[in-house]
Image: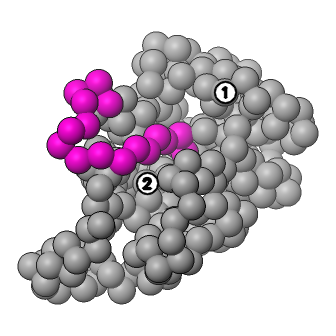
Amino acid sequence: MNIQNKNIVITGAANGIGHALARRMSEESPKSISLIDIKSSLKEVARSLNADSYIVDVSNEHDFQTVLKDIINKNGSIDLFCSNAGIQQFGTLETSTLDWQKNWDVNVMSHIYAAKVLIPQMKKQGSGYLLLTVSAAGLLNMPGAIAYATTKHAAMGLAENLSIMYGDDGIKVSALCPQLVDTDMVRSFGKLPENHPLLKDGLLSADVVAEEAIQGINKEKFLILPHKEVAKYIQGKAFDYDAWIEAVRKLVP
């Protein structure tokens, strides 16, 4: 998909990957860019890019869907929707039910809330594109972050299903699956030791991930892997699941 002259919406756009996507996509001469985030700092980001800003919680179905409908009414369509908002926290079975629900609502349900509005509109116009920021944790796993890894697996399943069900309607879907990215979310982990397993394949900048996303959208690739090593890990997992689990178990701190 060529994003020139397209109406673009990006969630989680106040910082990190979402902000980088907004900056990079603004260079492609889109028709419009609308940015969504729960943080008020989004307004300054939007002003710097001559974009519209909408402060809303994407886990609130009514409010989020109302904003999406407002954007469609204003711009006529949403051609490319970047469902990028996400949360992450460490924890295993001690993770509270409330925290499980927060992860589920943002990392899974926000994609579904958006799809319920966008799929009918895109089917009607005969085209559209959904980019879901999933994470390599949705393809592999993330020991010590049980709610995050589980909900990201669900997000990957959703992306696959949307592509299968609506591809013949002209709707393209991509799943963006980086490993560690230099964002506020990752910095919140604290400084990781240089030999930490999570740093094995490098810490990419959000700008690098955004560029990979643009290239993937241009080629209409379903799976976008900024860390190329992930493709090898997926193949190893599929080839011998038991050996893969044993290997990952050794990474547990």
Q: Which residue is mark 1?
A: 39
Disc 1 on helix, strand or loop?
Answer: loop
**Amino acid type of the residue that numbered disc 2 sits on in the rendered structure:** Val
**Residue 197 coordinates in the image, percent (x, y):** 40, 75
**Residue 96 coordinates in the image, percent (x, y):** 25, 30
Could you give the CA–CA distance between mark 1 and mark 2, rounded to whole angstroms?
21 Å
Instruction: Using the rendered view, name the quadrant where residue 37 is placed.
Output: top right
Coloration of the structure image: one colour
Q: Which residue is mark 2?
A: 134
Quadrant of the drawing holding the C terminus: bottom left
Q: Earlier in the sequence, mark 1 or mark 2?
A: 1
**Residue 232 coordinates in the image, percent (x, y):** 36, 86
**Amino acid type of the residue that numbered disc 1 sits on in the rendered structure:** Lys
Residue in front for this viewpoint, 114 or 240: 240
Quadrant of the drawing holding the N terminus: bottom right
What residue range appears in magenta?
83-99
Residue in front for this viewpoint, 110 or 253: 253
Please indicate, yes or no, whether residue 119 appears anywhere in the rendered image.
Answer: no
